[in-house]
Amino acid sequence: MSLLFTMPLWLATVPADADGGVVVWTGLRLDRPSAVIVSPPAPRIGEIEIAWVGARRPEASITARHVDGVEVLAGFEPALLADEHRALLDLAIPGTWSMRLDPDGEGPALPVRFEVVGGDAAPPWRSLWPAIFAWVPLAAIGLGAAWRRTSVR
């Protein structure tokens, strides 16, 4: 019974891993099946991850260009899985970003183009919501303990 009351408290303290993201492109590059995954699925101002799954050369890069003309360039680094590579881009302006991915270092690959729409920054209260609602499991534990104590007598 006590596990039932402590489980929500434990879940509230465990950091959540990000989801896998959204596949925005699939096709053949360097004669192998490849894919591009953008994470988080609903990007906002700040850092986003572009994952390239497939063969690449060390000169691989990704260029993000905002509709206002601002450009951000990033190189790829190996990820945990074989044939997976990731680049981190810091998008500073909300709006539409045109992405050009060059997996082989010979200029942007025409078929590997996609757009990402970044939203405004998350409201400050969203980063505080775990602390705001931390009292809920504590209150449940307290009420459960009080109910158990009064039912024993």
Image (tube, rainbow, N blue to C red):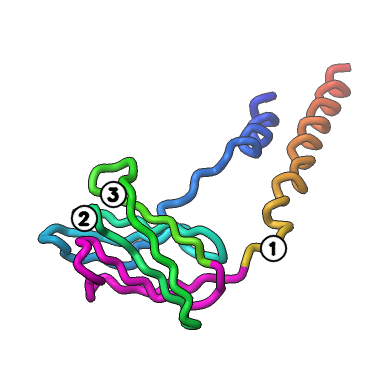
Identity of the residue drawn at 25% across and 57% down = 59
Residue ID for mark 2: 56
- For the C terminus, give its image quadrant: top right
Q: Secondary structure at mark 2?
A: loop
The span picked out in magenta is: 92-120
Residue ID for mark 3: 84
Identity of the residue drawn at 44% across and 73% down = 71
Identity of the residue drawn at 20% across and 61% down = 104
Q: Nearer the viewer, mark 2 or mark 1?
A: 2
**Picture coordinates of residue 66 (x, y %)?**
46, 77
Q: Secondary structure at mark 3?
A: strand
Residue ID for mark 1: 123
On the picture, is 37 further left or further right than 124? left
Q: Amino acid at mark 3?
A: Glu
12 lies above or below 51: above
**Picture coordinates of residue 151 (x, y %)?**
84, 23
Q: State which tag comes first along the sequence, 3 or 2.
A: 2
Identity of the residue drawn at 65% across and 39% down = 12
Say if mark 2 contacts mark 1, CB within 8 Å: no
- For the N terminus, give its image quadrant: top right
141 lies above or below 70: above
**Foreground residue, 142 or 28?**
28
- How busy is the neighbourhood of tag 2: few (under 14 within 10 Å), some, or many (20 plus)? many
Q: CA distance from mark 2 to mark 1?
A: 37 Å
Q: Amino acid at mark 1?
A: Pro
Q: Amino acid at mark 2?
A: Arg
- How busy is the neighbourhood of tag 1: few (under 14 within 10 Å), some, or many (20 plus)? few
Q: State which tag comes first along the sequence, 2 or 1.
A: 2
22 lies above or below 136: below
- How busy is the neighbourhood of tag 3: few (under 14 within 10 Å), some, or many (20 plus)? some
